Image (cartoon, helix red, strand yellow):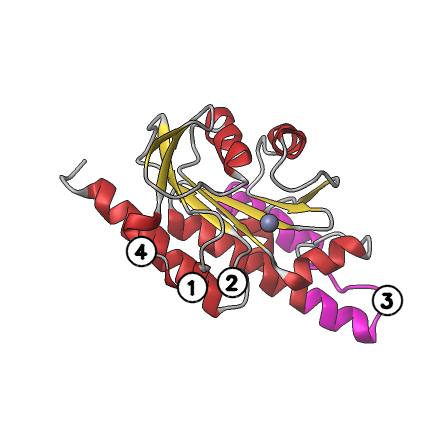
Amino acid sequence: MPLGSEEELKEDICKTMRRLFDRGLISALGGNVSARLPGASEFWITPSGVFKGELTADDLIKADLESRVTEGFLRPSVETPFHAIIYKKRSDVNAVIHSHNPIATGLALAGIQIQPVTVEAAVVLRRVQVVPWAFPGTDALADLVGKHIEGARALILMNHGVIGVGSNLLEAEAIVETLEEVATAQLVAYLFKKELPLIPEKDMELIKRLYKV
Ligand SMILES: [Zn+2]
């Protein structure tokens, strides 16, 4: 690992937050991002109660896998417990994004499942499960996330938002963005049709073979 990579990681978390804010996937106070150096037992996470569009590296907090703060001055995100549980359960995950995607969250409220309507949806998202409602920031929510995260890349939190995970920040960012893109395409389709034209079965088989999904 090159020297200073922890500082780069913190810069990347702030840049990711700004891009998500600019895209309307997180709001002034809603949404959080965390990342760790590959396999580390501590992770950096965004603070609670601070404007999300202009975070700097000094605003971030370091926490361990039991959600205990080990560095930083601000209060960590209230969702630190589910970030911690994801890192604990998934050694392949080094970045977690929780955003408030309006359309993906809306489809879940309407009881509509995210479907593999594009190749990206099939390859990047795989199967998107909906986590039942639990109050934000509680251990109950963290436990539910922990139960659903196995093998998942994206989850939708009922009445709340979404989670995307990846082996690095870029992957996690691509997941929450693709989720919103696919949800939007589905929403547009449902405005005009009741049944979605899905990718033909033989091409889905090809996608599965090519991308090993
Ligand atoms: Zn939230």
For marks 1 and 2, the one nearer the N-term is 2
Q: Are marks 1 and 2 in contact (CB under 8 Å)?
A: yes
Q: Helix, strand, or loop for circle 4? A: loop
Give me the C-alpha separation between circle 3 and circle 4: 45 Å
- Establish if 213 lies above or below 64: below
**Mark 2, residues whose alpha carbon is within 10 Å: few (<14), some, or many (≥20)?**
few
For marks 1 and 3, the one nearer the N-term is 1
Residue drawn at x 73%, y 47% is: 158
Residue positioned most to the right: 194
Apparent side of residue 26 relative to residue 166 in the rendered image (left or right): right
- Establish if 153 lies above or below 198: above
For marks 2 and 3, the one nearer the N-term is 2
Identify residue for label 2. 28
Give me the C-alpha separation between circle 4 and circle 2: 15 Å
Identify residue for label 1. 53
Indicate whether residue 198 is drawn in magenta: yes
Looking at the picture, which amino acid does disc 4 mark? Thr
Q: Helix, strand, or loop for circle 1? A: helix
Residue drawn at x 75%, y 52% is: 113
Q: Helix, strand, or loop for circle 3? A: loop
> Mark 3: is the Cβ under 8 angstroms from ligand 1?
no
| Label of residue 194 in the image | 3
For marks 3 and 4, the one nearer the N-term is 4
Identify residue for label 4. 56
Residue drawn at x 58%, y 38% is: 152
Magenta residue span = 185-213
